[in-house]
Image (cartoon, rainbow, N blue to C red):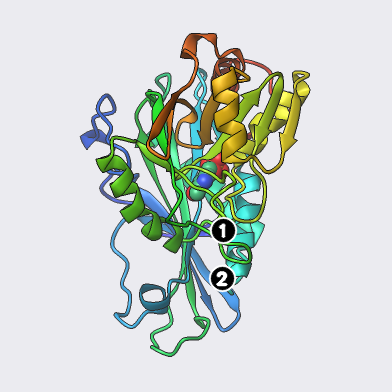
């Protein structure tokens, strides 16, 4: 049974919904996939066959270019359910823009708004019962694209698949994390691909992160590739500091420009804080922790919104940050965004995209 909607997205509904098999009180991240996925193919210079089909395996060639040369990018977005059942997606337009920036850097085609945003909307409409409703839960949305051409030569793939899969995720209670300032391994260099959400950026982080874990730290605080002097970001989240009454976040093309980071900077400005996007040296941070000028430090990303940082390790020394209770800016951000995303307060910025 197929039908065509206004975006000419072909919809093939599942005959066997798995919804009743999912224990919504015990969700493990990224394991219970929703009933449907969106798949679109790029061939001969154009996107075709945009379809929503039952979630399932894809058939690919073993010589597929993404597996060998890494043309693979993704996004991470969240959908929420209001008390009245409304389904809302948080700022997906920003993810769409960033996705296409990642695509261009890796010589991949843009995905048009009708497919990315329109597809997201149609997919979430069909799987709206998969969006969990209890406080703290959400539907994690993973759009991705990869080169599918079956050929071993190193050149841009002639064909691609764009796919969106989703899964309900449980309440995210983030514990404060400890970070190790990384002064040897490098995530991204000037002119590289640090700003793009491409698969390779995560593969390269696994080994140094494992070493940091063995030393007792939760994650790495990456520093610049040239001198290891300036702070960049954490594993999958941006870093934000409060120094005096200024909210500061590292800047540049070697970091991923997070939607959460941007959102928090916009809120800081609106709330009358001074907000700066600039280089932050490790020395400025360490000196500031010692003097008490650094009163808040947190990681910002779609997964947890705000993850407080408890401790920073640098050259064998640990530097403790002030107690979480006193961190009024980050606690206020967390509370405000929670209320906004569940539709409990006005949305003055138009950040909620209603499905
Ligand atoms: C996804 C990601 C972030 C956070 O971006 P959001 O848009 O806020 O989720 C930060 N750093 C890296 C490396 C990431 O992959």
The foreground one among 48 and 134 is: 134
Q: Which residue is mark 1?
A: 196
Badge 1: residue crowd in 10 Å (few <14, some 14–19, many ≥20): many
> Is residue 148 found left or right of 6 in the rendered image?
left
The foreground one among 178 and 90 is: 178
Q: Are marks 1 and 2 in contact (CB under 8 Å)?
A: yes
- Seen at 56% across and 58% down, the residue is 196
Q: Is residue 321 above or below residue 185?
A: above
Query: Residues under labels 1 and 2: Cα distance?
Result: 9 Å
Q: Quadrant of residue 310?
A: top left
The foreground one among 224 and 309 is: 224
Q: Is residue 32 above or below residue 256?
A: above
- Seen at 53% across and 59% down, the residue is 188
Q: Quadrant of the C terminus?
A: top right
Farthest left residue in view: 21
User: Reading the chain from its start, which is encountered first: label 1 or label 2?
Assistant: 2
* Place of residue 354 in the rendered image (x, y in percent of width and height, measured from the top left): 61, 34
Q: Which mark is residue 267?
A: none
Task: Give the structural element (helix, strand or loop) at label 2.
Answer: loop
Q: Is residue 132 visible?
A: no
Q: Which residue is mark 2?
A: 106
The foreground one among 114 and 26 is: 26
* Place of residue 231 in the rendered image (x, y in percent of width and height, measured from the top left): 57, 43
- Seen at 28% across and 50% down, the residue is 15
Badge 2: residue crowd in 10 Å (few <14, some 14–19, many ≥20): some
Q: Is residue 305 above or below residue 280?
A: above
* Place of residue 320 in the rendered image (x, y in percent of width and height, measured from the top left): 44, 22
Q: Is residue 297 visible?
A: yes
């Amino acid at each position: 049974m197929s039908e065509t909607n206004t975006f000419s997205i072909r919809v093939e509904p599942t005959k066997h919904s798995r919804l009743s098999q999912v224990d919504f009180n015990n969700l493990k991240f990224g394991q219970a996939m929703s009933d449907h996925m969106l798949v679109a193919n790029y061939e001969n210079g154009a996107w075709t066959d945009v379809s929503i089909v039952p979630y399932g395996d894809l058939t690919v060639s073993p010589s597929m270019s993404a597996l060998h040369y890494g043309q693979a990018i993704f996004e991470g977005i969240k959908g929420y359910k209001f008390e009245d059942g409304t389904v809302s997606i948080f700022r997906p337009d920003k993810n769409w823009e960033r996705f296409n920036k990642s695509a261009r850097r890796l010589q991949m085609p843009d995905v048009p708004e009708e497919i990315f945003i329109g597809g997201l909307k149609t997919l979430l409409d069909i799987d709206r019962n998969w969006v969990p409703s209890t406080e703290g839960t959400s539907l994690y949305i993973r759009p991705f694209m990869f080169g599918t051409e079956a050929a071993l030569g190193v050149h841009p793939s002639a064909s691609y698949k764009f796919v969106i899969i989703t899964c309900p995720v449980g309440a995210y209670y983030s514990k404060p994390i400890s970070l190790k300032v990384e002064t040897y391994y490098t995530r991204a260099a000037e002119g590289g691909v640090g700003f793009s959400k491409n698969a390779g950026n995560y593969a390269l982080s696994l080994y140094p992160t494992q070493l940091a874990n063995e030393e007792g730290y939760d994650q790495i605080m990456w520093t610049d590739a040239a001198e290891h002097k300036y702070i960049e970001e954490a594993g999958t989240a941006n870093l934000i500091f409060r120094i005096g009454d200024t909210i500061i976040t590292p800047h540049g093309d070697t970091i991923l420009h997070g939607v959460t980071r941007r959102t928090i900077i916009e809120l800081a400005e609106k709330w009358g804080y001074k907000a700066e996007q600039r280089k932050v040296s490790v020395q400025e941070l360490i000196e500031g922790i010692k003097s008490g000028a650094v009163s808040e430090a947190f990681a910002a990303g779609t997964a947890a919104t705000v993850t407080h940082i408890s401790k920073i390790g640098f050259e064998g020394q640990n530097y403790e940050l002030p107690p979480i209770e006193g961190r009024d800016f980050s606690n206020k951000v967390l509370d405000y965004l929670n209320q906004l995303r569940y539709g409990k307060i006005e949305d003055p910025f138009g950040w909620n995209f209603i499905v």
